[in-house]
Amino acid sequence: MNGHDVTRRRFLQVSSTAVAAGAVPAASASESDWSTAETPTASTLYDVEYTASGAYAVGAGGVALHRTGEGWRTAFDGGVTGNGNSLYGADVTDDGERLWVVGASGAVGEYDVETGDLRSHSAPTGSTNNFNDVAVTGPAGEANVYVAGDSGKIYYSFENGEDQTWEYVTPGSGSAVSAVDFHDVRAGHAVDTNGRVFQTTDGVTWNGVGIGDANVTFYGVDSDALDDVRVSGGGGKVFHYDGAQWTSTDLGDAGLRDVESENGDGFTVGGGGKLFDQTNGTWAQDRTPTGQNLEAAVRGSTDVAVGAGGIVLER
């Protein structure tokens, strides 16, 4: 996200190297069948996930929306503890039964999509800084939880976020960690606002793997394997790592807040309603019925993108 695609994929089915420039996509936007869904909020929606009971989106003021057979409905409001702290990131356990959310002032929550119970795991190790993203691996009740913080730390628990099980590590120089994503139980990637990408294979130790001379802020990461990573950032840039080098694709000037891709198919979203579709590794811009900034997207039986003003796009 915000990259959180590992559990989505499971459920629905080292050094800084130079950046090589990729091809710029065609200027003309491709035809699109994205449509706007009605939602019960005008608050910005920052993340979206698929669970065992359908899609959920979370956002400002601590709102969480659920996509039901009758449309989008409010699952809960007011955040994890009811104090209105905004929710910036979400991820789902491998079985789709629990939605984990994180946000402002140390908010961390675990939502049971079957019962509607919302459990707080807030302020791990006493931290109340803003949390930007979360990645979880494993089944409900036994999850490994990784939280990306504004303080430059990644907080982690290998015991479902229980009290006294949290630890933290600072992978970089202390710049805010903007997104985290895992492709295996304890293997994944994170990005910070200082143009750095970090990799772990044990969930504890993080090593830098780029990106040299990127010169943009990173917002989203999609970790598919140690040698298959995508990062989205400012200036319309998407970067891909193949285990040897990073290549970049320039998609224009919109800041790209999220990237989701698997086997060369996916999309990235960003400012001004910009949405780029990837097919067989090639990016092309989709027309969208909004000029609102888009914050996140998820693939599923119905593809969903969310953003400012409570906007939800579906395809």
Image: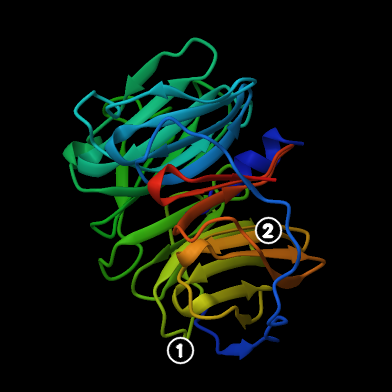
Between residues 75 and 225, which one lies in front from this camera angle? Answer: 75
Identify the residue position indicated by label 1 in the image: 213
Of residue 65 and residue 3, the one placed in the foreground of this image is: 65
Residue density around tag 2, few if under 14, some if 14–19, many if 20 or more, within 10 Å: many
* Label total for image: 2
Closer to the chain start, of discs 1 and 2, is 1
| Residue 261, numbered circle | 2
**For residue 9, what is the image quadrant?**
top right
Q: CA distance from mark 1 to mark 2?
A: 23 Å
Residue 93 x %, y % = 56, 31
Would residue 69 appear left or right of 130 to someone viewing this image? Answer: right
| x and y percentages locating residue 216 in the rendered image | 41, 80
Q: Is residue 267 left or right of residue 65?
A: right
In the rendered structure, which amino acid carries the disc numbered 2?
Answer: Ser
Q: Is residue 52 visible?
A: yes
Q: How busy is the neighbourhood of tag 1: few (under 14 within 10 Å), some, or many (20 plus)? A: few
| Dot 1: element | loop
- Could you tell me which secondary element the residue under label 2 belongs to? strand
Amino acid marked by disc 1: Asp
**Above-or-below relation of 269 to 137:** below
| Quadrant (top left/top right/bottom left/bottom right) for the C terminus | top right
